[in-house]
Amino acid sequence: MQTQEHNVIIIGSGPAGYTAALYNARASLQPLLFSGLQPGGQLMITTDVENYPGFPEGILGPEMMAKFREQCQRFGTQIRDEEVTRVDLSQHPFRVYVGETEYLAKSVIIATGASAKWLGLESEVTFGGFGVSACATCDGFFFRNKEVIVVGGGDTAMEEANYLTRMCSKVYLVHRREEFRASKIMLDRVLANPKIEMVLNTEIDEILGQTEPFKKVTGVRLKDTVTGEKREMPIEGVFIAIGHKPTSDLFKGQLDMDETGYLLPKAGTMTHTKIPGVFLAGDVADSVYRQAVSAAGTGCMAAIDAERFLESLGH
């Protein structure tokens, strides 16, 4: 059993985890970061990132995460590309497990992120980042004056559809039923928007596109959920807006979370949990913004809060 005690263990990578590691490493805390099964988080499946400050020409998501990783390693972060399988936050020092190996931590920063829910089509994977997206605020700019589809029936879908009308010429909202989970105010906004057309009792059967000489979406095959009839529709972008799932199962029964699974900070704080010494960063605690820059910001805050906590222990 590994029993070395670490000042800070960061669970998860991406902008939040790597930024927390950078700040803690520069504070000479020698953080240990477990990057998980997808080092770099959601940006590893993102193509062009054009809305992160400091990259006027844009940058590929994986390239950006490689730079984040290199920067926090430069100052002494120890990174392990392993997945944390269990945590015990009931005693201090905290216990973090990778399989049967135990790690002790004076403080823990949780940056496990969240992932978009998908329809489960192979074509979603094929054209992910090439016309298929789960983030209108990230990718809407690439569809200026184009026609796109938003899939979903909740507040997220309504918000994404409304946002996309700022740059797209037409937005089709595809929903498999006639009833919506969305709040009345969000639904009313969509119904009042002349650039949005409802396509109800309909689901996407397949996303169509080309792979040579380059990948791009050219249309979708729609299926009527009542009659089963199928038809093809030309389209240039597909936004999946059926919700996100925070990666928080590790912490069930130990930390407060909402009904979806987003971890909740202690009242009046941004990163503190109800357990002193355990802090939150990034999308695992953010159901609203879900941006790389906001995740990095909370990573910075969690790192500073962890540093102050360690100072209170006399580190």
Image (cartoon, grey):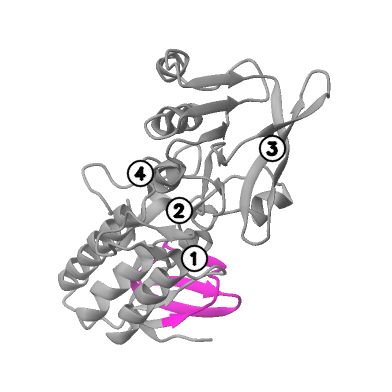
- Per the image, label 4 sits on a secondary structure element best described as loop
Q: Residues within 10 Å of mark 2 (few under 14, many from 20)?
A: few
Q: CA distance from mark 3 to mark 1?
A: 43 Å
Residue 33 drawn above or below residue 196: below
Estimate the x, y position of residue 108 in percent, counting from the top left.
36, 67
Q: CA distance from mark 2 to mark 1?
A: 9 Å
Q: Is residue 207 visible?
A: yes
The answer to whether marks 4 and 1 mark residues whose Cβ atoms lie closer than 8 Å is no
Earlier sequence position, callout 4 versus callout 3: 3
Residue 250 drawn above or below residue 140: below
Type of the residue with mark 3: Val
Type of the residue with mark 4: Tyr
Q: Is residue 266 left or right of residue 126?
A: left
Earlier sequence position, callout 3 versus callout 1: 1
The answer to whether marks 3 and 1 mark residues whose Cβ atoms lie closer than 8 Å is no
Residue closest to the eye, 100 or 27: 27
Magenta span of residues: 79-107
Type of the residue with mark 2: Gln
Which is closer to the viewer, label 3 or label 1? 3
Earlier sequence position, callout 4 versus callout 1: 1
Q: Is residue 176 left or right of residue 61?
A: right
The answer to whether marks 2 and 1 mark residues whose Cβ atoms lie closer than 8 Å is yes
Q: Which residue is mark 4?
A: 289
Q: CA distance from mark 2 to mark 3?
A: 43 Å
Q: Which residue is mark 2?
A: 254
Q: CA distance from mark 4 to mark 2?
A: 25 Å
- Per the image, label 1 sits on a secondary structure element best described as strand
Estimate the x, y position of residue 191 in percent, counting from the top left.
47, 14
- Per the image, label 2 sits on a secondary structure element best described as loop
Q: Which residue is mark 3?
A: 220
